[in-house]
Image: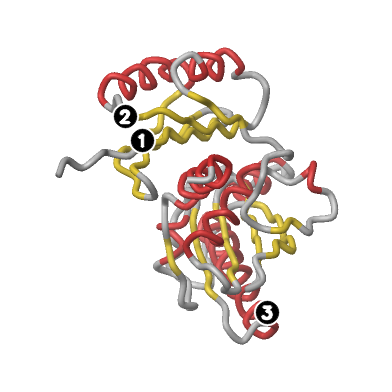
């Protein structure tokens, strides 16, 4: 008996500078790339040629500035451009849903798919550090937004007269014995204490809690956090893929 190969999905997360792209075979990611806007069409064309079974696409975009690229995807695939009216696999109890970032919706969707009927805290460590919580009833309650690591370094430089702008570096000790070491200690330890403290408070409220850490700084932070967490780099793309499948009833 000949097996019939299922259609594949193209998942696109358009950022201000870079675009993350994934190809999914059902719920498994089989291709991942990150490109600048100038290379976007070339990458999409390559995917079209190398993965002819891709039929559907989903796009999450931070702004309307990339409309040309969105139309390019639509010319090849049946495309869902995600907005706040899209059907979601969970109940959204956020009081101002129109102000909620699409990326946060996708992260919650991934949590619903991979950790059904569990209390889940998703921590996305990027430009901002976002905390999002969905309960065992598959209800999204909200969370918190805080400055990310690089934003904290930059703010010390922007809003003071003499503090330098530094790159991320693990502090040598808690007590910084130079201005640079003091900045590294303040920023990195501050972020770690914040995340550990937030996790601890959620654990006090929820006896059973699964914690997901994702985002650009997840790898750097995961080795330094004391709490038990799942660190994953594909959670956002996986969430978008689940939203697409949910809307297509696959």
Q: Position of residue 178 (x, y in %)?
A: 52, 60
Query: How far apart are the alpha carbons under marks 3 and 2?
Result: 46 Å
Q: Is residue 193 above or below residue 244?
A: below
Q: Quadrant of residue 160?
A: top right
Could you say which disc has been placed on residue 121 in the image?
A: none
Tell me the crowding category of disc 2: few under 14, some 14 to 19, or many 20 or more residues within 10 angstroms, Cα based.
some
At x 52%, y 18%, the residue is 74
Quadrant location, the N terminus: top left
Q: Position of residue 223 (x, y in %)?
A: 39, 67
Q: Quadrant of residue 165?
A: top right
Which residue is disc 1 drawn over?
7
- Name the outermost residue toward the left: 1
Query: How far apart are the alpha carbons under marks 2 and 1?
Result: 5 Å
Which residue is disc 2 drawn over?
53
Which circle, 3 or 2, is nearer the viewer? 2
Q: Position of residue 170 (x, y in %)?
A: 43, 61
């Amino acid at each position: 008996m000949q097996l019939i190969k299922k259609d594949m999905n193209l998942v696109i997360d358009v950022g201000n500078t870079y675009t993350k792209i994934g190809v999914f075979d059902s719920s498994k990611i089989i291709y991942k790339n990150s490109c600048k806007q100038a290379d976007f069409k070339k990458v999409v064309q390559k995917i079209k040629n190398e993965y002819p079974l891709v039929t559907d696409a989903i796009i999450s975009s931070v702004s309307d500035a990339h409309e040309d690229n969105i139309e390019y995807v639509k010319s090849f695939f049946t495309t869902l451009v995600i907005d706040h009216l899209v059907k979601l696999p969970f109940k959204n109890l956020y009081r101002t849903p129109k102000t909620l970032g699409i990326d946060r919706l996708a992260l919650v969707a991934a949590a619903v798919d991979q950790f059904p009927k569990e209390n889940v805290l998703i921590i996305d460590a990027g430009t901002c550090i976002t905390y999002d919580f969905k309960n065992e009833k598959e209800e999204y309650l909200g969370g918190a937004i805080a400055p990310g690591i690089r934003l904290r370094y930059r703010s010390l430089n922007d809003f003071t007269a003499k503090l330098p702008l530094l790159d991320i570096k693990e502090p040598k000790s808690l007590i910084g014995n130079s201005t640079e070491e003091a900045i590294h200690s303040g920023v990195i330890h501050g972020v770690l204490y914040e995340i550990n403290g937030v996790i601890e408070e959620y654990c006090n409220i929820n006896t059973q809690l699964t914690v997901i850490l994702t985002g650009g700084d997840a790898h750097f932070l995961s080795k330094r956090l004391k709490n038990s967490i799942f660190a994953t780099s594909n959670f956002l793309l996986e969430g978008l893929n689940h939203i697409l499948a949910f809307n297509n009833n696959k």
